[in-house]
Image (cartoon, rainbow, N blue to C red):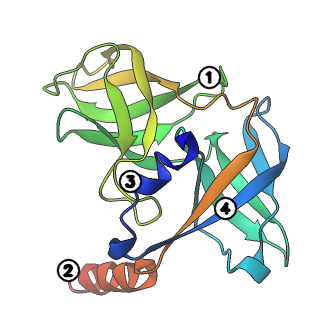
């Protein structure tokens, strides 16, 4: 069954719950795109839950009503998601330059990271929203920034953002505890 390939990789023993849903409305042509899904508070969907498809990540729940949720698409200039290069331990921030709905950007990857066009980009371990290793896309091109310290990387998305129906909403059951611990640790500085 093709559609469970990504979802089956989510280790539910690590306290992630998965709810399936469908897209009601999807925008991809403005600078701040949102997706509406047919799951909401009645389905225990809440702000800051990750949304994926069987191919990769879509976005993060921003608001909920009883039966619907609005999702900030990864095609949104406010979106920032921890992502990593599959074959190395290097990671950066996944952002969108608003130019093309098939491509997002990975920033803050240091120049010593070994890169190749075609390398797979996945969600990173330091996201409190997405489980690690959810697919995002592949490197389509890269170069060095003006300081020559970091790469700018174009990532061709696995998802066709114009043609999506079925989604999975991911709840990190430990997120609240992790965030409280991080805030406590920052307060100790």
Q: Earlier in the sequence, mark 4 or mark 1?
A: 4
Which of discs 2 and 1 lies nearer the camera? The answer is 1
Q: Mark 2 points at which residue?
A: 189
Give the distance between the C-alpha atoms of the residues marked 3 and 1, in whole angstroms.
24 Å
Residue shown at 65% from the left, 71% from the top:
47
**Left or right, 63 with reference to 185:** right
Residue depicted at x 75% and y 68%: 63
Is the Cβ of the residue at disc 3 closer than 8 Å to that at disc 1? Answer: no
Q: Where is residue 20 in the image (x, y as percent from the top left)?
A: 66, 61
**Quadrant the N terminus occupies:** top right
Q: Are marks 4 and 2 in contact (CB under 8 Å)?
A: no
Residue at the disc numbered 3: 9
Task: Name the mark nearer the viewer: 3 or 1.
Answer: 3
Residue 45's x, y, as percent?
68, 74
> CA–CA distance between discs 4 and 3?
15 Å
Query: x, y percentage for residue 61?
Result: 66, 62
Q: Residue 20 carries which label?
A: 4
Nearest to the observer: residue 160 or residue 176: 160
**Would you name the residue on which mark 1 appears?**
102
Dot 3 surroundings within 10 Å: few (below 14), some, or many (20 or more)? few
For residue 148, what is the image quadrant? top left
Q: Quadrant of the C terminus?
A: bottom left
Q: Residues within 10 Å of mark 1 (few under 14, many from 20)?
A: some
Secondary structure of residue under mark 2: loop
Residue 141 location, x and y as percent?
40, 12
């Amino acid at each position: 069954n093709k559609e469970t390939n990504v979802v089956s990789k989510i280790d539910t023993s690590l306290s992630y719950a998965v709810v399936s849903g469908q897209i009601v409305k999807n925008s991809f042509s403005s600078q701040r795109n949102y997706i509406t899904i047919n799951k909401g508070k009645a389905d225990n969907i809440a702000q800051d839950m990750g949304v994926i498809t069987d191919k990769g990540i879509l976005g993060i729940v921003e608001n909920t009503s009883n039966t619907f949720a609005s999702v900030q698409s990864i095609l949104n200039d406010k979106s920032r998601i921890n992502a990593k290069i599959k074959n190395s331990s290097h990671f950066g921030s996944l952002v969108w330059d608003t130019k093309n709905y098939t491509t997002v950007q990975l920033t803050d990857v240091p120049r010593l990271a070994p890169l190749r066009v075609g390398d797979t980009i996945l969600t990173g371990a330091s996201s409190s929203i997405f489980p690690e290793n959810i697919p995002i896309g592949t490197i389509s091109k890269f170069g060095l920034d003006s300081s020559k310290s970091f790469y700018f990387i174009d990532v061709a998305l696995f998802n066709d953002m114009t043609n999506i129906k079925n989604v999975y909403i991911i709840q990190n059951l430990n997120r609240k505890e992790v965030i409280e611990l991080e805030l406590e640790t920052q307060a100790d500085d």
